[in-house]
Image (cartoon, coloured by chain):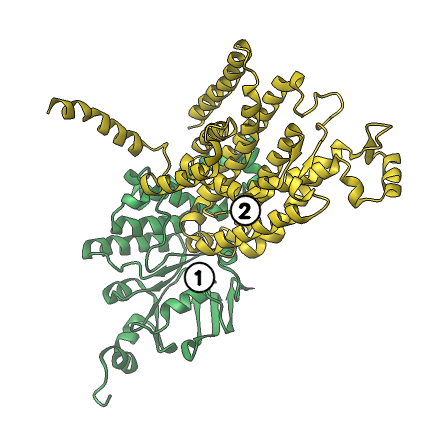
Chain colours: A green, B yellow
Amino acid sequence: MPIFEVENMCRSFGGLKAVDGVSFSVESGQIKAIIGPNGAGKTTLFNLIAGSIQPDSGAVTFKGADIYALPPHKIAEKGILRTFQNIKLFPHMTVMENILVGSHRKMRAGFLQAAFPLPWTYREERDAREKAAQIAEDLGIDTLLDTELANLDFGSQRVVELARALAGEPEMLLLDEPAAGLNIHETLQLSEAIRKIMEKGITILLIEHDMSLVMDISDEIIVLSYGKKIAEGLPAEIQRNPEVIAVYLGTDNA
Amino acid sequence: MKKTRYISLALFAAGIVACQLIFTALGTDYLLIQLTMSAYYALVVIGLSLLMGYAGQISLGHAAFFALGGYLTAVFSTNQLQEVVSHEMLTRLSRIGIVYSSDAHDALYRLHPALSLPTVIIVTIIIAIIIGIPILRLKGHYLSMATLGFGIILYRIFLGTKVFGEADGISNVAPFDIPGFFPIGGESSFRVPNYYFAWFLVIIALVLLLNIIDSRVGRALRAIHDSEEAASAMGVDTGRYKLIVFIISALLAAIGGFFMTHYNAGIGPSEAGIMKSVRYVSIVAVGGMANLWGCLIMGVVLNYLSLRGYFGSYDDAVFGALLIAIMVFAPNGIFKKEIFDKIRHFVSRIPCRFSK
């Protein structure tokens, strides 16, 4: 029984069919990667799933519930959290505060409770801070907690973004090119981190250009080209698939 | 963090008490009048600091909310009430106690004080929602334009409507008279209690706002300021949060206007004017935007100086110039370490210059 299903998702921008009838499903606890050449519609597909772009048509279900075309914060409330291809953190907040924003969906205090705090609001805040510190330690950024985000190097920012998403205790994580801009050493650390996340039983949907990383960690791969799904299968199958090879390397008769 | 907050609050309260004691001892307690008025203006400023500094949503129309609170209560507590409600209706309402006549000869009907403040609060919330839902979808310049437009519309309504006294405004507003409590108004015998009442309101508002800022909600607001897209991806209902902050800041402005109008026994259309809105924005900018304490202190100091007439007829020009200067030289406000460092650096180099 898949935890997450996309059916016949479509979205055009003007005359361009950015995502054209894509269907796939993700099993619980699986790492599924979406690959494809630049402009294949991977990030658009992600934005459609996460609610930051409205789809033209299609269907999305998560844990049996319809989440089609919900706004982003509702998708997050359901337990699907994401990272961004071009890191989107909060530059005027510390690393700790950034991670705590991730805990937003797991906390309850609203405006009234914040203005008139009760013992449970303090407890909630303290617990969230402890959890954030724990996540930071797991990912090796615990020394940076009090640093203002704008002062962080690029690699650390990627890790903070991952930590922020984890603080929300997601059931499914959408990672949009997490290795983009990382050096070999940082990419290795990243794949280690992703493995740890997988061990916690979190389902992962991943867009990635780094083929060695994709082949290394993913259970299954979907290949997009010009908005359409052209192949789906195990990494080994995808590597041998002639259509995929044609898309990436071009064909003789092209 | 918690500890320093209580120390700051205690120091601030001590400062308020000290001002009163010193002015009374020196026999210059008429200065308390301007300080009381500054307190009511400070309510607008700290609310705007939450909206602009923390949530990152500019409003160039907050004077309209201040005036809204003031004008409504002015209508409720003067003869203007008879402009909108027929005499028969007023007599009927007076029988059930909703309105009452304070003076048998004058037949001046007023809305019962227990109802006027709640009415102002409810009307302000409704207007803030009606305005806020469409305009808070806008960002940056577009949002400032829309709030500017809103401010101008309300200004023209106050200026052009008979009930609101047109260009003259409404005068002879009775004190806000809660039975068993001293009257909130300009009577000199109640000058000191009124001073403390105004500052009590400011401190209550300040504590509530500080609580909000130091919480999950405050973090969500700052997150919205930095990246709305990322905030919503983490589950923050950005539209709802922005609207609630807009309502809170509108309420603080309206409550400030409400008590100010009773204190001054009147209100005029200039309170709703665009220059007033610009003034609030420039005070928040000088105070450091996302710095409630900075905004509060600048709100008191600048309004006090303005009310005492130190800026003369260049009043609005001073605030305009201040806004430009702060944007050019200290965009993060003047209560920043880097500013003090700059000053210290400058001062420490003075002897070198002389020795050359």
Task: Give coordinates of residue A44: x percent, y percent.
Answer: 40, 68
The quadrant of the image that shows the N terminus of chain B is top left
Q: Does residue A157 lie above or below B214 as drawn? A: below
Q: Residue furthest bottom?
A: A253
Residue at position x 20%, y 25% from top? B348
Question: How many labels, in total?
Answer: 2
Q: Position of residue A239 (x, y in %)?
A: 26, 75
Tag 2 secondary structure: loop
The residue sitting at 75% across, 20% down in the picture is: B180
* Relative side of B140 to B47, left or right: left
What crowding class fits label 2: few (fewer than 14 Cα within 10 Å), some (14-19), or many (20 or more)? many
Give the farthest residue toward the left.
Answer: B356
Residue at the far top: name it.
Answer: B25
Under mark 1, the amino acid is Ser
Coordinates of residue B333 in the picture (x, y in percent): 37, 36
The amino acid at mark 2 is: Gly
Q: Nearer the viewer, residue B17 or B277?
A: B277
Q: CA distance from mark 1 to mark 2?
A: 51 Å
Q: Which mark is residue B61?
A: 2
Give the quadrant of residue A84.
bottom left
Chain letter of the residue carrying label 2: B
Q: Disc 1 on helix, strand or loop?
A: loop
Disc 1: which residue: A28
Residue B118 can be seen in this image: no
Position of residue B22 measured from the top left corner of the image (x, y, whole percent): 51, 12
Name the residue located 74 percent from the left edge and 32 percent from the top edge. Answer: B113
> In the visual, does B38 lie left or right of A205?
right
Q: Is residue A88 visible?
A: yes
Q: Which residue is at the front of the view, A95 or B201?
A: B201
Dot 1 alpha-carbon crowd within 10 angstroms: few under 14, some 14 to 19, many 20 or more:
some
Residue toward you, B248 or B182: B182
User: Which quadrant holds residue A97?
Assistant: top left
